[in-house]
Image (cartoon, grey):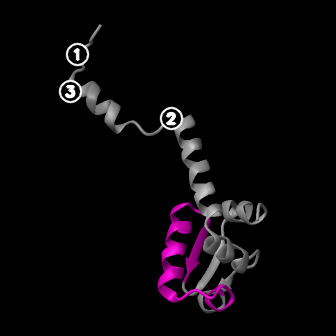
Amino acid sequence: MNKNISDDELEDIMMRGPSARESKTGDHDMMFKALGNPVRRKIIVSIGTFGKSVAEVMKETGVDRSQLDYQLDFLNKGEYTVVDEDICRLTDKGLGLLSNI
């Protein structure tokens, strides 16, 4: 049986956000990607519980600025880190990652 969908119904379907299950699955995928990358793990460990400056993280991890910016962008999108001015900090989600390394 093929039901015709009205334009309004189609728009509602397209505007609807992900289900709770889809959202949780996306969170888990992002977490595995964050923990699966050795450079990201080094960055998370370097930032630690209290946070560090960008320069300190670069020195401790041995990555250059462009690589650090790339990895921090990924971690920021996953809501694992925040960078305020020149200080990198782990969010509550980021601290959860740290406890699993």
Give SS at disc 3. helix
Q: Which mark is residue 4?
A: 1
Which quadrant would the N terminus be assigned to in this image? top left
Confirm whether the magenta stretch covers residue 60.
yes
**Amino acid type, callout 1:** Asn
Of mark 1 and mark 2, the one earlier in the sequence is 1
Confirm whether the magenta stretch covers residue 53.
no
Toward the top, the furthest residue is 1
The reply to whether discs 2 and 3 touch (Cβ–Cβ < 8 Å) is: no
Q: Which mark is residue 24?
A: none
**Amino acid type, callout 3:** Asp
| Extent of the magenta region | 57-84
Of residues 64 and 73, the one nearer the viewer is 64
Give SS at disc 1. loop
- Chief SS of the magenta region: helix
Q: Determine which residue is flagged by label 2.
A: 19
- Residue 5: % across, % down: 24, 20
The reply to whether discs 1 and 3 touch (Cβ–Cβ < 8 Å) is: no
